[in-house]
Amino acid sequence: MGLFEFKELTKEYRRGGRAFNAVNSVSLSVEPGDFISIIGRSGSGKTTLLNMGAGLLHPTGGSVLFEGHDIHRLNDKELSFLRNEKIGYVPQGQSLLSNFTVFDNVRIPWFLFKREGDVEGRAFILLEKVGISHLAASYPRELSGGEMRRAAIARSLINQPRVLIADEPTGDLDVQTTAEIMRLFSSIAEEGTAVLIVTHELDTLNYGDKTYSMDAGNLSPHAA
């Protein structure tokens, strides 16, 4: 049994009166420390798959298992706690809150549920890890795209999740910054957190240990 599993996961939509599967019976097993990349063109179903995995979108069929439990059978409060505690999520684009400093953005998930510990110390450690501790007092409008992405990654790790999910994390970054972000994901996986990303950029194939291709909702091992 994997840490995080998709079992025959399906999402059906209707277009022009006809049904189609944006995700078509996808199965995938993720273990601690895995670094898995899913590549595919826009519209191939990658984001839909991740959103079901993160519990943000309910599947039409199949299941998402976390530590053996179907997350879509949880009630809203239980699912929110699971996402907050165990699943880090980095969405597409800019996701920081503009009226909060980088430091406060990183700390936000900590306060969504009652917990104890040194959140300030952990936030600074994470900002150092992602290379932007000098920007702790800055606001999102003062950051570059790569710096904002690093802050979002730090925020996703504040509660020490077991799985980190990232949707197109390098889609708007230059080649050098892309390489830096991908190396950061590699180091996170080496420390034991499973990393699952989706991307359309072939340059990312040099990173991670497992790569899959997604096309028209179907997932298959990527052929080198």
Image (spheres, rainbow, N blue to C red):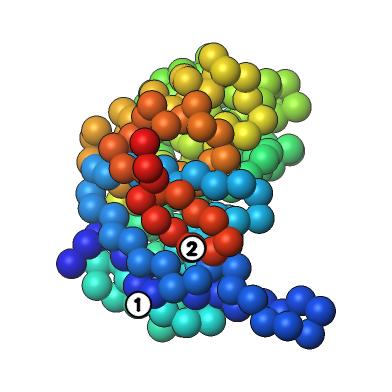
Q: Secondary structure at mark 1?
A: strand
Query: In the displayed structure, would residue 81 be above or below residue 102?
Result: below
Q: Secondary structure at mark 2?
A: strand
The location of residue 49, given as percent across then percent down, is 51, 62
The residue labelled by disc 1 is 70
Query: Which of the 4 quarters of the picture holds residue 147?
Result: top right
- In this figure, what is the number of numbered marks? 2
The residue labelled by disc 2 is 218
Q: Nearer the viewer, residue 156 or 28?
A: 28
Q: Nearer the viewer, mark 2 or mark 1?
A: 2
The location of residue 203, given as percent across then percent down, is 50, 26
Residue neighbourhood size for the residue with mark 2, other residues' Cα within 10 Å, grouped as few (<14), some (14–19), many (≥20): some
Residue 215 in sight here: yes
Residue 27: mark: none
The quadrant in which the C terminus is found is top left
Q: Nearer the viewer, residue 111 or 51?
A: 51
The location of residue 70, given as percent across then percent down, is 35, 77
